[in-house]
Image (cartoon, rainbow, N blue to C red):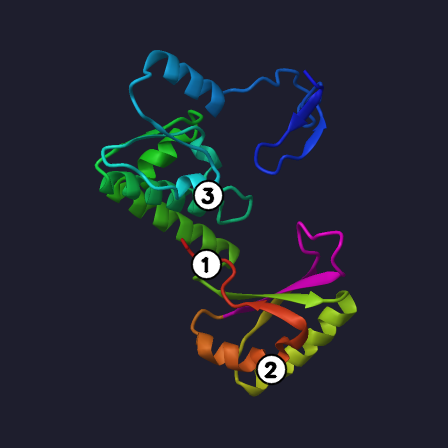
Amino acid sequence: QTGQASCRSCRKSWPTPTACAVCQGVDLGKSLPGIERLRTQWNDHYPDTTIHWRTLVAEELEAPLASACLVVVTEAAWLGVGEDIRKSERQCLAVRRLADRVATKHGTLIFQTQGHFAPNITEWLTTAGMQHFVARTLEERQHFGYPPSRRVVKILCRGDQIVANAWRAQAETALRLAHIEPVDWRGTLVPERRSTTRSQQTLLHLVLPPHIPEALLVQTLTPLAAHVTLDIDPIAFLR
């Protein structure tokens, strides 16, 4: 009615498009009814049955549940949102944690989702399916050189590429003296979703063999951490 589209998560608004920016399609209607519409329909037909509605908002997923509860997730594919390599892992963990909480309360859990996503839920909630998912995900991580096949350290430098390369030179010396080898580097990279109010930052990834002890790595890099932010395990497996 206002000619504006808005995001339910961050509340950002923008002019409603007339066609898809990717395929130029004009059928932009919702493929699934939203939570307000579902709640209205449910209350009209089953006013005496209490139902717990859940969206992708973390606070709702962690909200207390009553005994013998009935829980509906209105779009399961949104659980664990994100576009990095961990997206399916986060979705899997979110589904399993919620299912466990509902089972503990002897309740019933209903997922509303796209047809192509439904087999994922079935896989994640069975022992054999979860074993297959873990094996497949480990294979993908090994192919791309991510943990646990390699150890990856994320370094966020405060400054431009010159500052980041100078820090890298210091780190290479420290790693060599600590007999931490072989090492590889990815970057320099520009961080995604960086606030425009912050000063410039540059990203580096330090890639190491998986057997390097975390304690030795922390001891070696901590003296160099005055002007950087270190994340020792930024792409943890199923965590």
Q: Are marks 3 and 1 in contact (CB under 8 Å)?
A: no
Quarter of the picture containing the N terminus is: top right
Give, as a three-letter code, the residue at label 1: Ala
| Secondary element type, mark 3 | helix
First in sequence: mark 2 vs mark 1: 2
Amino acid at circle 2: Pro
For the residues labelled 3 and 1, the Cα–Cα distance comes to 20 Å
Magenta span contains residue 18: no
Front residue (pair 147, 102) = 102
Residue that badge 1 annotates: 236
Could you say which quadrant of the image residue 51 lies in? top left
Mark 1, secondary structure of its residue: loop
Residue 14's disc is none
Image quadrant where one finds the C terminus: bottom left
Residue lying furthest top: 45
On whether residue 195 falls in the magenta region, the answer is: yes
Left or right: residue 71 versus residue 239 is: left
Kind of residue indicated by mark 3: Ala
How crowded pointer 2 is (Cα within 10 Å; few <14, some 14-19, many 20+) is rated as few
Q: Is residue 229 above or below residue 174?
A: above
User: Can residue 80 be spotted in the picture?
Assistant: yes
Which of the pair 166/53 is nearer the observer?
53
Instruction: Give the mark toward the camera: 3 or 1.
Output: 3
Q: Which residues are magenta?
A: 187-208
Distance from the alpha carbon under mark 2 to that under mark 3: 36 Å
Q: Is residue 84 left or right of residue 156?
A: left
